[in-house]
């Protein structure tokens, strides 16, 4: 039963958080402390979504109730019922446990709170295609508000892995391949998810950037595979986004990754969890294990001789909480302490971190949610409209030969063809609701009255049947234009669903070629979670849109771009390679990475480097067309010489020289011309999005400082070396010197 002391300092909201933490921890038994260090499933304390007190008692006895993971994929997706169940769980903890410590309820939110009825935004790779940090921040604010209204106080997002291995099935959850772009997106997401701080109010949640670190580069592209990088590449490429998440955005939790680096699983890496995270970055939050990551030390990595040993290794390395259940912590951790194998001080250390977050979240004051309020907030019209706005700005125009796009709304006959034309592809970690818009619906909503819109599926995503292709060909023959929706689905692009190649799966290429051969103009719309090698399409089809997984309003958003209601402004956050054989294909490669001879060959005439192909990308990072033209002039770099600790200012004039209004992402890259250790051929350092009317021009100014110019030298020290730095903006190039 809850404590009946007349005054409990830890329940006094007027006292400082640190005082409340110390008061509470001083009252706790060892068992109560250990119980804070593991989580439980919400489904494990319910029957068909209904709270079960007997199961709840069992979870408490297993010593795993510090955190409870919300339903998500549970058997009952009735959201109001879930909220009431969450309230009953919190009520039980407050009223029927000795100290009345509420649970943190966690949920997913990479592109919308993962539950029925919440707003579904474009997936993270599409969010990154906007190159708009303010917009991504607003997405996070809505995610937080909708999640917190449903009782969720911690979101296990954002994903800060770099998408440098496109075969990997979780590319869709990332902000692309670049450390700087990912850092800026991550900071915007975390700041808006958590609010202004230090406390987290009832319209925000704690953030949990993941997967620390370098999870997006597994061997063979297979999820959980080893990552083969050295400390220099780790620090220079993979850690900056996490450092920004901690040191700039103040993330309150971090999720270490499943994989190993140089033989050490991240879950037991003292280098990552202590030296980097705690000592170098001063992280004060708590570490939340990925699901079953600790079990895997015993069952998968083979670095522990038992589950108990796995728990001990992870805990001593700095893993504060085990998820999703106390398999390696719980009773095992309790026994370690009693036997003297784990010090009680280290238990207190981790418990403090978790309790501190509970106080910052205000859970001791009010851990409950109001289903009626949640109903008024979740996917309300303003949120839905914003999801559409984000989707429009995320679409990337890859090709527009002969200005086929935008299409006229008065086009008499339009064929909409493909396995993704009349179904909504949301991608992984997606909720659902009743208002999803397909591309076919979007086209029908956009065209003029009297326009004939026909539909043919043609084929499946990965099935090998070609029976539907003749119908699609007939539809194309009888149309003035054919809009083709092709790409991927969750069956082929998901966590744990990786690919051995990057071609369109199934017989989709046969479908595209058959429709193209009718002679009807073709627009290909890609709906996918990873870069696809579309070399044939790029060489033949006149117009191509990369739409990724565009969220609940995706159909309308794509139609707005197709018919000119919106001028596309998305830019690729990841390179599209010519083939899977070109992987790795990221843009910020080292000078020696794309060949020495530069003599691409072709069938019948072999060249050098790749004998029968160019090593160049099909579409580069940062690429994206518009329905207007932008001209860059007057690149100015001042001063021309700076000291290592000084700053340099870069200015450029951008003019809309086309006939329609549009937005342009101004991107600044640098190249350290000569360095004592090899550095990338070019690296993104600044970007901004500007909107210009026809004939309008604007001067954009960026400031670069020592951190932008620094490199890790041969002694693993961050230094700014003397020498020339090239600056590249919009096809213009200049330079300055560090003296």
Image: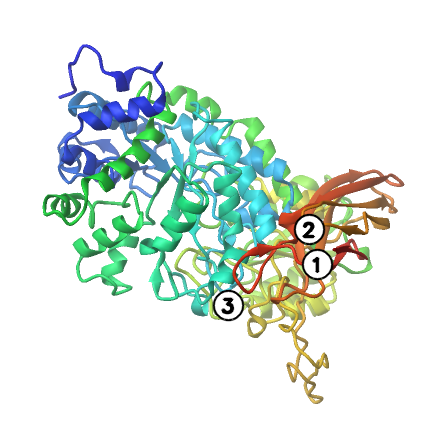
Looking at the image, which residue sits at the far top? 6
Residue hosting label 2: 644
Instruction: Compare marks 3 and 1 and give the one earlier in the sequence.
Output: 3
Report how far apart the C-alphas of labels 3 and 2 lie in the structure. 54 Å
Q: Residue at x 27, y 58 (%)?
A: 296
Dot 3 lies on which element? loop
Q: Is the Cβ of the residue at disc 3 closer than 8 Å to that at disc 1?
A: no
Q: Residues within 10 Å of mark 2 (few under 14, many from 20)?
A: some
Q: Residues within 10 Å of mark 3 (few under 14, many from 20)?
A: some
Dot 1 lies on which element? loop
Q: Is the Cβ of the residue at disc 2 closer than 8 Å to that at disc 1?
A: yes
Q: Residues within 10 Å of mark 1 (few under 14, many from 20)?
A: some
Is there any visible trace of residue 705 in the rendered image? yes
> From the viewer's perspective, is 297 left or right of 710?
left
Q: Nearer the viewer, residue 449 or 290?
A: 290
> From the viewer's perspective, is 461 left or right of 661?
left
Residue hosting label 1: 722
Q: Nearer the viewer, mark 3 or mark 1?
A: 1
Q: Residue at x 43, y 58 (%)?
A: 491
Report how far apart the C-alphas of labels 3 and 1 lie in the structure. 53 Å
Residue 547: numbered disc:
none
Instruction: Compare marks 2 and 1 and give the one earlier in the sequence.
Output: 2
Horizontal and vertical percent position of residue 552? 54, 40
Q: Residue at x 30, y 22 (%)?
A: 20
> From the viewer's perspective, is 48 left or right of 72?
left
Horizontal and vertical percent position of residue 530? 54, 58
Horizontal and vertical percent position of residue 285? 38, 37
Report how far apart the C-alphas of labels 2 and 1 lie in the structure. 7 Å
User: Which quarter of the rendering shows the N terminus?
Assistant: top left
Residue hosting label 3: 506
């Amino acid at each position: 039963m809850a404590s009946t002391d007349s005054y409990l300092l830890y329940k006094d909201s007027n006292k400082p958080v640190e005082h409340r933490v110390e008061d509470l921890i001083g009252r706790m038994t060892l068992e109560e402390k250990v119980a804070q260090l593991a989580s439980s499933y919400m489904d494990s304390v319910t029957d068909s979504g209904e709270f079960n007190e007997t199961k709840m008692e069992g979870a408490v006895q297993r010593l795993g109730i510090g955190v409870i993971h919300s339903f998500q994929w549970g058997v009952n997706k009735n959201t109001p019922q879930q909220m009431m169940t969450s309230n009953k769980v919190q009520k039980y903890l407050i009223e029927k446990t000795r100290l009345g410590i509420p649970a943190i309820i966690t949920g997913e939110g990479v592109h919308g709170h993962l539950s029925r009825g919440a707003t579904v935004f474009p997936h993270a790779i599409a969010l990154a295609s906007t190159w708009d940090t303010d917009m991504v921040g607003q997405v996070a604010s809505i995610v937080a508000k909708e999640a917190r209204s449903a009782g969720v106080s911690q979101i296990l997002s954002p994903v800060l892995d770099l998408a440098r291995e496109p075969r990997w099935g979780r590319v869709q959850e990332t902000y692309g391949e670049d450390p700087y772009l990912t850092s800026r997106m991550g900071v915007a997401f975390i700041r808006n998810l958590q609010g202004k701080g230090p406390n987290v109010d009832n319209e925000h949640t704690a953030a949990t950037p993941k997967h620390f670190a370098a999870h997006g580069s597994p061997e063979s592209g297979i999820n959980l595979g080893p990552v083969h990088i050295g400390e220099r590449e780790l620090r220079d490429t993979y850690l900056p986004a996490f450092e920004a998440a901690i040191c700039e955005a103040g993330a309150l939790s971090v999720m270490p990754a499943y994989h190993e680096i140089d033989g050490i699983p991240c879950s037991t890496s003292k280098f990552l969890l202590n030296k980097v995270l705690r000592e170098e970055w001063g992280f004060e939050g708590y570490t939340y294990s990925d699901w079953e990551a600790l079990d895997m030390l015993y069952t998968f990595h083979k670095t522990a001789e038992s589950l108990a040993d796995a728990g001990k290794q992870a805990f001593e390395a700095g893993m504060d909480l085990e998820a999703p259940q106390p398999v390696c912590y719980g009773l095992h951790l309790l026994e370690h302490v009693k036997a003297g194998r784990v010090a009680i001080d280290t238990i207190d250390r981790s418990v403090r971190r978790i309790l501190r977050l509970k106080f910052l979240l205000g859970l001791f004051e009010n851990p409950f949610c109001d289903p009626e309020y949640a109903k008024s907030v979740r996917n309300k019209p303003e949120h839905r409209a914003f999801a559409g706005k984000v989707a429009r700005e995320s679409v990337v125009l890859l090709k527009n030969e002969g200005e086929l796009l935008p299409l006229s709304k008065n086009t008499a006959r339009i064929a909409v063809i493909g396995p993704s034309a009349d179904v909504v592809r949301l991608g992984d970690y997606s909720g659902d609701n009743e208002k999803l818009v397909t591309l076919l619906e979007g086209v029908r909503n956009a065209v003029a009255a009297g326009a004939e819109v026909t539909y043919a599926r043609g084929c499946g995503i990965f099935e090998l049947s070609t029976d539907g292709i003749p119908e699609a060909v007939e539809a194309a023959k009888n149309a003035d234009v054919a809009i083709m929706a092709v790409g991927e689905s969750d069956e082929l692009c998901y966590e744990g669903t990786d690919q051995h190649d990057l071609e369109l799966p199934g017989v989709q290429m046969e479908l595209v070629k058959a429709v193209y051969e009718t002679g009807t103009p073709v627009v290909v719309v890609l709906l996918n979670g990873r870069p696809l090698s579309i070399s044939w399409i790029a060489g033949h089809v006149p117009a191509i849109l990369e739409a990724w997984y565009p969220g609940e309003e995706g159909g309308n958003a794509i139609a707005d771009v197709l018919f000119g209601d919106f001028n596309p402004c998305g830019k690729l956050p990841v390179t599209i390679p010519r083939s899977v054989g070109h992987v790795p294909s990221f843009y910020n490669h080292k000078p020696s990475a794309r060949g020495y001879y530069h003599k691409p060959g072709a069938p019948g005439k072999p060249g050098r480097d790749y004998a029968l192909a160019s090593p160049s990308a099909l579409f580069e990072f940062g690429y994206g067309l518009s329905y207007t033209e932008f001209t860059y002039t007057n690149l100015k770099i001042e001063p021309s010489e700076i000291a290592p600790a000084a700053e340099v200012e870069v200015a450029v004039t951008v003019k809309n020289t086309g006939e329609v209004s549009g937005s342009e992402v101004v991107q600044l890259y640098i190249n350290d011309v000569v360095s004592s250790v090899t550095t990338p051929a070019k690296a993104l350092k600044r970007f901004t999005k500007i909107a210009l009317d026809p004939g309008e021009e604007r001067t954009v100014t960026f400031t670069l400082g020592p951190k932008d110019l620094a490199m890790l030298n041969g002694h693993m020290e961050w230094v700014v070396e003397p020498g020339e730095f090239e600056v590249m903006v919009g096809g213009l190039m200049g330079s300055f010197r560090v003296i």
